[in-house]
Amino acid sequence: MEITIWSDFVCPFCYIAEEHLNQALSTFSEKDDVTIEYKSFQLDPVGTYQPELNYYETFAKLKGMPMDKVTQMMDSVKNMANEAGLTMNYDDAKYSNTLKAHRVFQYAKEEGRGNDYFHRFYRAHFVEGLNIEDNEVIEKLSQELGLNLADVQAILNDSQTNHQKVQDDIATAGSIGVQGVPFFVFNNKYAVSGAQPIEIFKNVLEQVAAES
């Protein structure tokens, strides 16, 4: 079974939904025959890290929302993450543009480390409060995954390297009607959108397996 996932490193519902999928897969009888492929998506292509603002302030400014509403919304997301067994540390999180990280992700994918790269950058953003827009952070995390530092630096130093690959992923998403992430496609046939509960993923896995 092939599962294709469109996601962004800073998408909280992607982080949560993929944990729900992992928990569904843990009891799936054919889990050893499942392959997962990530594809790039950007929630905010023009946003960037603003060091003078914390995450709550940045989000309130971008969305034009009062701070109490933003805090309430973030608390709700954190509770959802906690229920999935995840940490969502918005107190330290840095609102970041993810284009550079996605360009390096395309290289990591070619090296067979794409899935590990996505998981590492989720943790860096949501748990460790790292600015994943920063070159040094991207380089350090990439090295942790065994990627060649010189190759990573070459990608970061040339804004066109892998840019088209990122845009192609996003364009493919648009061509199949994806308007937001997370978006999961099973065997190029069944689609699941959003942070669905574990039982939904279990049902889809069983249905796809039965039809295969």
Image: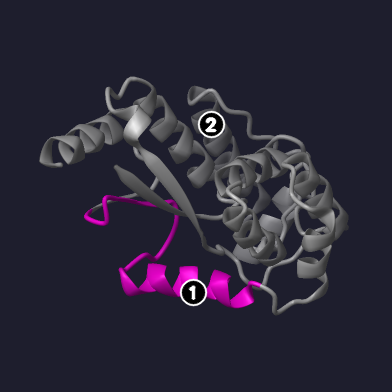
Secondary element at image label 2: helix
Q: Amino acid at mark 2?
A: Ala
Task: Say which of 66 and 96 sits in front.
Answer: 96
Residue wearing tag 1: 168
Q: Quarter holding the C terminus? A: top left
x then y, percent, for residue 168: 49, 74
Q: Quarter of the image holding residue 160?
A: bottom right
Number of other residues with Cα within 10 Å of mark 1, as a class: few under 14, some 14 to 19, many 20 or more = some
Q: In this rendering, is residue 122 above or below 8?
A: above
Horizontal placement of 15 versus 52: left or right? left
Q: Give me the C-alpha separation between circle 1 and circle 2.
A: 30 Å
Residue 197 seen anywhere in this rendered image of the structure: no
Residue at image position (70%, 35%) is: 127
Number of other residues with Cα within 10 Å of mark 2, as a class: few under 14, some 14 to 19, many 20 or more = some
Residue wearing tag 2: 81
Residue at image position (74%, 49%) is: 147
Residue 165 highlighted magenta (yes or no): yes
Task: Say which of 18 and 118 sits in front.
Answer: 118
x then y, percent, for residue 57: 74, 54
Horizontal placement of 138 versus 99: left or right? right
Nearer to us: label 1 or label 2: 1
Q: Quarter of the image holding residue 51?
A: bottom right
Query: Which residue range is magenta in the image?
Result: 162-189
Residue 114 seen anywhere in this rendered image of the structure: yes
Horizontal placement of 23 versus 166: left or right? left
Q: Amino acid at mark 1?
A: Asp
